[in-house]
Image: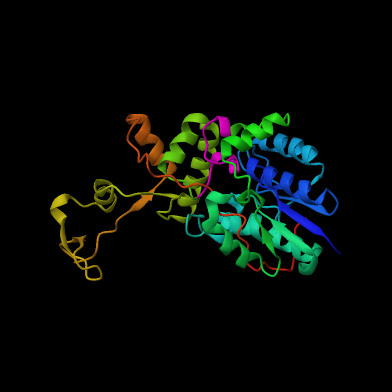
């Protein structure tokens, strides 16, 4: 096998632009556009990518001149089946949905189909995401990794979208709807309050779907777990059943010159954050539309890091 070029196709504009540059340089022979679909075999339209992303994938692949290859995790699970099976919600420290549904299936496909000595992996990360380049190179080793959008001519997102339209392709609609990325329908386990409120206001049906699944997960397991966190002091006290009279400040033992809150009766350090459910956030902004942390944003940054070594007892289908 020689001259393989595998572009990780996310269904967003950046991966299309990366694929265009790969084909401009190498032609279409030996190029694969690899799309890991997080929807699996779920029936709900809210379970995976926005429906318009699938339209975009077809048009983008036709424009590049290479059909895309769709892969799913071996059991074809969606993100909620992963959370239920693994008994934990994905979050910004452990995005297990990305690990199980994107990283591992992609790694399995590459291991089964590509010789490291004759294959290059291409990722759509651009010049503004240089901090992610080296971790991804390490994660994909021994396959070499290149970043076509980190090379000149440097383009920002708006320029990439203009390029798409000049090619006769309408970008995924989530960009025009004000989302930071076009993945997972605008939902992400790494989202912040500002991202969640934007989803609530622009796609309340999808928000309601994930809110209901989060509530069901909590109720079935009787756990106080959530994707997001509330860092307001008053919220921490309320969640823990405390009042301002119950807590006080003291010097932080591991940070000279800084202080921390603690519970006077027990001496226990007061946490700086507590879980914030999608339901609680919705009720809060319904009562007062401005009452959320507008600076709390968490852009999609999970895939394409692929350091995980998947279970090889079953491959993607």
Q: Residue at x 76, y 66 (%)?
A: 111
User: Does residue 182 show up magenta in the picture?
Assistant: yes
Q: Nearer the viewer, residue 247 or 9?
A: 9
Quadrant housing the N terminus: bottom right
Principal secondary structure, stretch drawn in magenta:
loop
Q: Is residue 158 above or below residue 192?
A: above
The answer to whether 152 appears left or right of 275 in the picture is: right
Q: Is residue 202 above or below residue 182?
A: above
- Residue 52 rendering spot, x and y as whole percentages: 66, 33
- Residue 56 rendering spot, x and y as whole percentages: 70, 36
For the question of whether residue 146 can be seen, the reply is yes
For the question of whether residue 74 can be seen, the reply is no
- Residue 105 rendering spot, x and y as whole percentages: 70, 59
Quadrant housing the C terminus: bottom right
The answer to whether 260 appears left or right of 58 in the picture is: left
User: Does residue 201 show up magenta in the picture?
Assistant: no
Residue 167, image quadrant? top right
Q: Is residue 154 above or below residue 96?
A: above
Residue 134, image quadrant? bottom right
């Amino acid at each position: 096998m020689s001259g393989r070029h595998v572009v990780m196709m996310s269904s967003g504009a950046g991966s299309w632009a990366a694929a265009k540059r790969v084909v401009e340089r190498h032609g279409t022979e030996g190029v694969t556009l690899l799309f890991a679909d997080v929807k699996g075999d779920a029936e709900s339209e809210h379970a995976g990518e926005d429906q318009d992303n699938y339209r975009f994938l077809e048009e983008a692949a036709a424009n590049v001149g290479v059909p895309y290859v769709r892969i799913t995790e071996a059991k074809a699970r969606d993100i909620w089946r992963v959370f239920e099976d693994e008994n934990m919600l994905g979050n910004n420290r452990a995005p297990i949905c990305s690990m199980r549904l994107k990283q591992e299936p992609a790694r399995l496909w590459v291991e089964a189909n590509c010789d490291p000595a004759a294959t290059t992996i291409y990722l759509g990360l651009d010049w503004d995401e240089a901090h992610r380049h080296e971790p991804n190179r390490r994660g994909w080793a021994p396959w070499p990794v290149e970043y076509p959008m980190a090379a000149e001519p440097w383009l920002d997102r708006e320029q990439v979208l203009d390029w798409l339209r000049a090619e006769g392709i309408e970008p995924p609609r989530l960009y025009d709807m004000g989302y930071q990325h076009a993945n997972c329908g605008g939902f992400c386990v790494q989202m912040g309050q500002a991202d969640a409120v934007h989803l609530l206001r622009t796609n309340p049906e999808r928000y309601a779907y994930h809110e209901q699944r989060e509530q069901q997960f909590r109720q079935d397991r009787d756990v106080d777990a959530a994707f997001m966190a509330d860092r307001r002091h008053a919220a921490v006290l309320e969640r823990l059943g405390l009042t301002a009279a119950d807590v006080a400040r003291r010097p932080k033992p591991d940070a000279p010159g800084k202080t921390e809150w603690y519970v006077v009766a027990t001496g226990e350090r007061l946490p700086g954050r507590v879980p914030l459910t999608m339901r609680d956030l919705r009720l809060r902004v319904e009562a007062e539309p401005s009452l959320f942390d507008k600076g709390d944003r968490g852009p999609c940054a999970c895939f394409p890091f692929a350091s995980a070594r998947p279970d090889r007892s079953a491959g993607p289908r």
